[in-house]
Amino acid sequence: MKVLLLDKKKEIGTPVRCGEGVAEHSEAELGIKVLPSAIASKIVGARVFAPNGKSLCLKTAATHGYVLERKLFDKHLAMDAVRAGAHVLPHALALSLLKKEGRPSGVKVLHMGEEIEFHAPLIVSAEGMEARIAREAGFDAKATLYDVDTCFEYEMAGVSCEPYIDLYFSTRVANRGYVWIFPKGKDVANVGIGIGGSVGQNPKAQLDLFIAEHPELFKRAQPVEYKGGLISVGAPINEFVKDNFMVIGTAAHQVDPIHGGGIGLAIEAGNMAAEAAAEAFSKGDYSKKKLFSYEEKWRKQRGPKLAKRLVLRKVLEKMSDDDWNYLINSINDADLEKVLAGDFKPVVAKVVLGRPTLLKVLSALV
Amino acid sequence: MTQKFGLDPSKCIYCAGCVSVCPVLALTLNETKIVCDEGKCIACGICEKGCPVAAIKITKPK
């Protein structure tokens, strides 16, 4: 099988649009080896902060993870692809989809001032949020403001860090989103903000506000990089495959609607899609029917869990700062663990008992 | 005719958020340049709202 990897970036992995956090997976699960140089720091747990500063700490095997150095991680993936026999072409912007007899048959690419046509029986879109070629192929991968968070992030030095992923919830600062601090070392961290796309707060201005309000964390901190982007926090797109075409990862909105993470999900989807592609190649059949095994497997393994988390997102976005303070105050670390595992009932019962007004908001969870 | 899509390149961080939310595929990010196909742009203003650094200003045609 001949594989061509096109990346519009002239340096694969740069610029980064990501918090770079990923849960710990085994090499066997991922099907790839993460080199130590691509791991900026190891994470043992997560802390959730209420608007009033109170926090819950989650530290279990499931909360172990890494903050990656995506600039190296992505480049290493491309190097692995070369080792596996793929052709790789950076600085290659896919301009448009080519069709033959109504079916996708390739892409037109802009590379070093030249327009080049590449023809292939199978095209895989891993285009991220832009998903231009996937949309041109008829996939409903358009992002709406309601189902995205708009994000801005600094990589900062001079931040005192502990090996936790810290999430700060506050509608005043980050309505329908949160502020994150993901440590990349002892005194370096990704400090970012995600805000609901339809709420009208300016992410950069709001992150600057948060930093100004937390001198205990940022007194000596200075940015060394500006990053940003939009991330889907809605449902996955309604189909991942068509004849001669597959969509994977963030382009397919395979993203966790609560925290906006998509690295692990994209790698999983990539593996499933690769299996389907290999099977299609062996039979010489690239029809939707043949490729559907990828979509079927993904929906079965990941679909229900993400759907539950989308419901949770839509519940959380209705909560006021006062509700958040009450919630974090009235539940404990073990309760939070249950919620994140998808078991809402005992926690909802506990919260609603003390604050019946939250019943309407939380009832969607039980 | 006035250009509909106005971008302040000194603010832009090339995140392509505008490209993702454009409902008519009028925008493309080419390395460090956002290109707008003015023929496709419908001046809906969604990209302006989605920009995380307020770098976009849409002018509605009169």
Image (tube, rainbow, N blue to C red):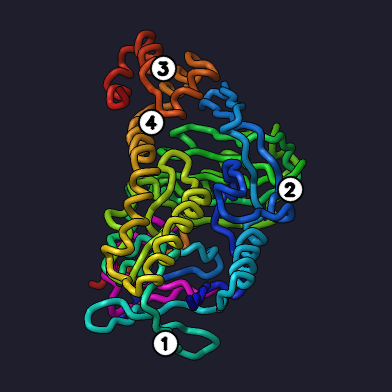
Q: Nearer the viewer, mark 4 or mark 1?
A: 1
In the drawing, what numbered circle is on residue A105? Answer: none
Kindly report the distance in space between the C-alpha atoms of the residues bearing marks 1 and 3.
56 Å
Q: Which residue is mark 2?
A: A157
> Which quadrant is home to the C terminus of chain A?
top left
Disc 2 to disc 3: CB gap under 8 Å? no
- Residue A341 covered by magenta stretch: no
Q: Nearer the viewer, mark 2 or mark 1?
A: 1
* Viewer-nearest residue: A81 or A154: A81
In the drawing, what numbered circle is on residue A117? Answer: 1
Q: Are marks 2 and 3 on the same chain?
A: yes
In the drawing, what numbered circle is on residue A316? Answer: 4
Q: Nearer the viewer, mark 1 or mark 3?
A: 1
What is the crowding at mark 2: few (fewer than 14 residues within 10 Å), some, or many (at least 20)? many
- Label 1 sits on a secondary structure element that is strand
Q: Which residue is mark 3?
A: A347
Query: Upstream in the sequence, badge 4 or badge 3?
Result: 4
Query: Upstream in the sequence, badge 2 or badge 3?
Result: 2
What is the crowding at mark 3: few (fewer than 14 residues within 10 Å), some, or many (at least 20)? many
The part of the chain drawn in magenta is: B24-51
Q: Are marks 4 and 2 on the same chain?
A: yes
State the residue at coordinates (46%, 64%): B16
- Say what amino acid the circle numbered 2 marks: Ala
- Percent across and percent down for residue A174 are 47, 39
Relative to A324, residue B3 above or below: below
Task: Check the residue under mark 1 and report the chain it is in.
Answer: A
State the residue at coordinates (22%, 83%): A101
- Say what amino acid the circle numbered 3 marks: Val
Disc 2 to disc 1: CB gap under 8 Å? no
Query: Upstream in the sequence, badge 4 or badge 2?
Result: 2
